[in-house]
Image (cartoon, grey):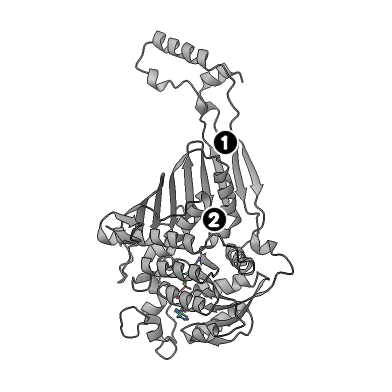
């Protein structure tokens, strides 16, 4: 096609992305773990849903071995052993595990309101810490954790495992190569539509004050009589959880920090939403949307528990292209930004004016148009066995050996958590939340 033909056909006729180049992603850190690396001896605190996932994933990581587990609910000590697939010492009091000199690291998979206490105790005992997301239950907790990690020179990794996923590593490469041009807007969401997706988890028949250490569970939260619903569905209550923001926003924000390299708290957050369907006494909305201001960048996050369309998706909009990240793949679609004679503005002119405009445009634009970038798509191979949690744990174990910072360290994790707390602050105060870096507090 000659330049002139291209100009006449206009942008729409040569669709950007008509051809797609597809590439399979390569395995992550767990699969690349080198033989001969020292085995990290770790214990786990919290063997509920996530703790069991961590233990199962850790079985795929040859550089670590579980040497103990703690949980406040007796039956979960058995669940932890099943998940690890072997006998391990268990206890309801995690502090007895921290006393052991043969333990290098602690995986913290407790309810959010225990993250600070267990992390600080583990650090005081000289251990490195992998702490589940959201890193903190409130801003003060996060700041205390950052200080403890840095003062004691410990390795800390927060637990948004997508940070170690080959999918996000590829998205980060595409972003860093500048393929997107100027990026000023990112939109991300996780949507669900089921009782489980709205945290209505089973309450086991054997739950009782004998099988559950209720006082230990409450910790600094308001005292109240034993309530198994609060224990097993703690995500519904602000005393222990941060709702949709702490549960799901944090993953999306950690992914965005990974892709863009943003590592700061947002300057402003405005939230809207509501509790529309799951009116079961919970404290949090079942739809939450937050608009964030980051330096030079607008980030919109929304999570819906009443419609699953769209699943888990992050879209990065740039002046030269769009990056879409879903669970198992990433696609870069270039924008057609080649100069073209734009006819719309000439619509109010005469035919001869239009012709004159086109002639002038053609006279200036003599060079052949640049080739369009290809749409590129990177996916995990079908039937892949990559597990981003295993990769994340492997990254942590390696850092425990090398003493090098992981990407999702205490600063990164704290920034993502602060953004979550700002989302809730804005929602509950019906106000714009701002981050004051000087006082290190949320205002508004
Ligand atoms: N990274 C992810 O994808 C992911 C997924 C789910 C949950 N999480 C996070 O993992 C954490 C746990 O969530 P969950 O779904 O497993 O909850 P859960 O209720 O299933 O399990 C939490 C367990 O922690 C135990 N616990 C609390 N305080 C303890 C303490 N001081 N000592 C010993 N045990 C203690 C409780 O007894 C409970 O069994 C949360 O912070 C959550 O946000 C992360």
Q: What residue is pinned by disc 1?
A: 17
Give the number of the disc on residue 327. Answer: 2
Query: SS at mark 1?
Result: loop
Q: Which badge, 2 or 1, is on the more N-terminal residue?
A: 1
How far apart marks 2 and 1 lie (CA) works out to 21 Å
> From this viewpoint, which residue is outermost toward the left?
430
Residue 272 appears in which quarter of the rendering? bottom left
Residue 165 shows in this picture:
yes
Residue 285's x, y, as percent?
A: 32, 63
Residue 150's x, y, as percent?
A: 49, 67
For the N terminus, which image quadrant?
A: top right
Report crowding for label 1: few under 14, some 14 to 19, many 20 or more residues within 10 A (C-alpha): some
Q: Is residue 434 left or right of residue 197?
A: left
Kindly identify the residue that appears in the image at 51 percent across and 77 percent down. Answer: 122
Residue 343 appears in which quarter of the rendering? top left
User: Toward the viewer: 172 or 316?
Assistant: 172
Residue 41 vertical placement versus 353 (above, below)? below
Residue 411 vertical placement versus 122 (above, below)? above
Report crowding for label 2: few under 14, some 14 to 19, many 20 or more residues within 10 A (C-alpha): some
Residue 289's x, y, as percent?
A: 35, 54
Kindly identify the residue that appears in the image at 34 percent across and 53 percent down. Answer: 269
> From this viewpoint, which residue is outermost toward the bottom?
210
Query: SS at mark 2?
Result: loop
Tally of numbered discs: 2
Residue 46 shows in this picture:
no
Q: Is residue 137 left or right of residue 49?
A: left
User: Toward the viewer: 371 or 434?
Assistant: 434
For the C terminus, which image quadrant?
A: bottom left
């Amino acid at each position: 096609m000659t330049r002139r033909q291209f100009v006449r056909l206009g942008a729409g006729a040569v669709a950007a992305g008509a051809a797609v180049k597809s590439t399979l992603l390569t395995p992550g850190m767990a699969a690349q773990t080198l033989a001969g690396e020292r085995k990290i001896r770790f214990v786990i605190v919290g063997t509920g849903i996530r703790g069991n996932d961590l233990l199962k994933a850790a079985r795929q990581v040859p550089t670590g071995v579980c040497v103990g587990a703690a949980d406040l609910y007796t039956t979960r000590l058995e669940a932890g052993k099943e998940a690890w697939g072997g006998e391990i010492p268990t206890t309801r009091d995690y502090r007895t595990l921290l006393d052991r000199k043969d333990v290098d690291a602690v995986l913290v998979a407790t309810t959010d309101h225990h993250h600070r206490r267990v992390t600080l105790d583990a650090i005081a005992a000289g251990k490195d810490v992998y702490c589940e997301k959201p890193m903190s239950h409130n801003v003060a907790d996060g700041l205390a954790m950052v200080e403890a990690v840095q003062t004691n020179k410990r390795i800390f990794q927060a637990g948004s495992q997508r940070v170690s996923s080959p999918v996000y590593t590829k998205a980060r490469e595409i972003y860093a190569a500048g393929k997107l041009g100027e990026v000023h807007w990112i939109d991300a969401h996780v949507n669900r539509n089921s009782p489980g997706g709205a945290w209505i988890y089973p309450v086991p028949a054997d739950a009782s004050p004998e099988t559950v250490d209720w006082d230990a569970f409450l910790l600094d939260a308001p005292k109240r009589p034993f309530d198994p619903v609060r224990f097993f569905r703690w995500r519904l209550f602000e005393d222990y959880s941060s709702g949709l923001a702490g549960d799901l926003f944090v993953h999306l924000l950690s992914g965005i920090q990974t892709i863009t390299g943003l590592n700061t708290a947002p300057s402003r957050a405005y939230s809207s939403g509501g509790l529309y369907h799951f009116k079961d006494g919970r404290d949090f909305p079942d739809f939450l949307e937050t608009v964030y201001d980051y330096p030079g960048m607008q980030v919109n996050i929304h999570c819906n528990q009443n419609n699953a369309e769209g699943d888990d998706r992050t879209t990065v909009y740039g002046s030269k292209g769009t990056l879409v990240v879903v669970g198992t793949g990433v696609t870069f679609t270039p924008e057609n930004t080649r100069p073209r004679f734009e006819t719309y503005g000439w619509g109010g002119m005469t035919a001869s004016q239009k012709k004159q405009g086109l002639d002038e445009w053609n006279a200036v634009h003599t060079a052949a148009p640049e080739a369009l970038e290809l749409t590129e798509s990177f996916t995990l191979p079908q039937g892949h066995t990559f597990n981003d949690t295993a990769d994340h744990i492997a990254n942590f174990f390696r850092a425990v050996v090398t003493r090098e910072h992981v990407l999702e360290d205490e600063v990164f994790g704290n920034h993502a958590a602060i953004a979550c707390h700002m989302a809730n602050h804005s929602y509950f105060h019906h106000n714009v939340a701002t981050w004051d870096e000087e006082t290190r507090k949320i205002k508004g």
